[in-house]
Image (tube, rainbow, N blue to C red):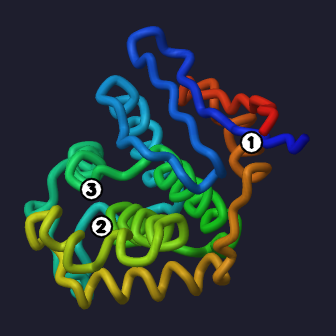
Amino acid sequence: MNVLTTPMVCSRSPEALLCKKYSSYANFTSSIDRPFLSLLVAFTTSTATSLIPCKTKRSTQTTVTAAQLPPLDEFIAIVFQRSQLTPCVCLVSLIYLQRLKMNLPSHARGDVDTPYRLFLAAVLTASKFMSETGTCLTSQAITEMTNHVYTPKDINLMERSFLGLIKYDLFVDVQGIKDYLAMHGKILEMDLIEEVLDI
């Protein structure tokens, strides 16, 4: 008799009633539930804005003005809603942002849109790492879902820079998700439960 351990991510929020099963940690099959989305957006916004001190005015090197960008929480909500990302991809993108913060030098400073750029790069990278071939986000798709605020070339540059900053440390396993939820699951109102199945 073989035994299969099936992890399950469940929300503690009675409103969310989120319960996503997956046969391996990489295979959530459903997109984010609406009540859970508000928790995820708030947490992701807080994470992105706490990564690095940023300027309040646009520098001459930044092509995007603050007027072109919606508030960060609205921007993140738009990307999550339009991309239909699975909860697992969203969690992995948060883990990547955590790794980025740990690797940044203390003197690092960002521009007015740096939180937007880091969020997009993390989501794109997580999508590529977690998805089957041909099902991940693309630079062109992100450009369209963000109303062409950034070009595909901008997105590609963000991704390359992001990969360098996290030193290409992309691998995330079930234990990595467990560790992250041990720290932040209470805020996100999420748990990781493992069921042992006889097969």
> Residue 149: image x %, image y %?
13, 71
> Residue 137: image x %, image y %?
33, 70
The mark nearer the N terminus, 3 or 1, is 3
Kindly report the distance in space between the C-alpha atoms of the residues bearing marks 3 and 2.
Answer: 20 Å
- The residue located at (34%, 23%) in the rendering is 35
Q: Along the line of sight, which residue is nearer the eye, 8 or 34?
A: 8
Image mark for residue 178: 1
Residue type, label 1:
Lys
> Residue 173: image x %, image y %?
73, 58
139 vs 181: above or below: below
Image mark for residue 113: 2
Disc 3 target residue: 83
13 vs 185: above or below: above
Q: Nearer the viewer, mark 3 or mark 2?
A: 3
Q: Residues within 10 Å of mark 1 (few under 14, many from 20)?
A: some
Q: Along the line of sight, which residue is nearer the eye, 16 or 40?
A: 16
Q: Nearer the viewer, mark 2 or mark 1?
A: 1
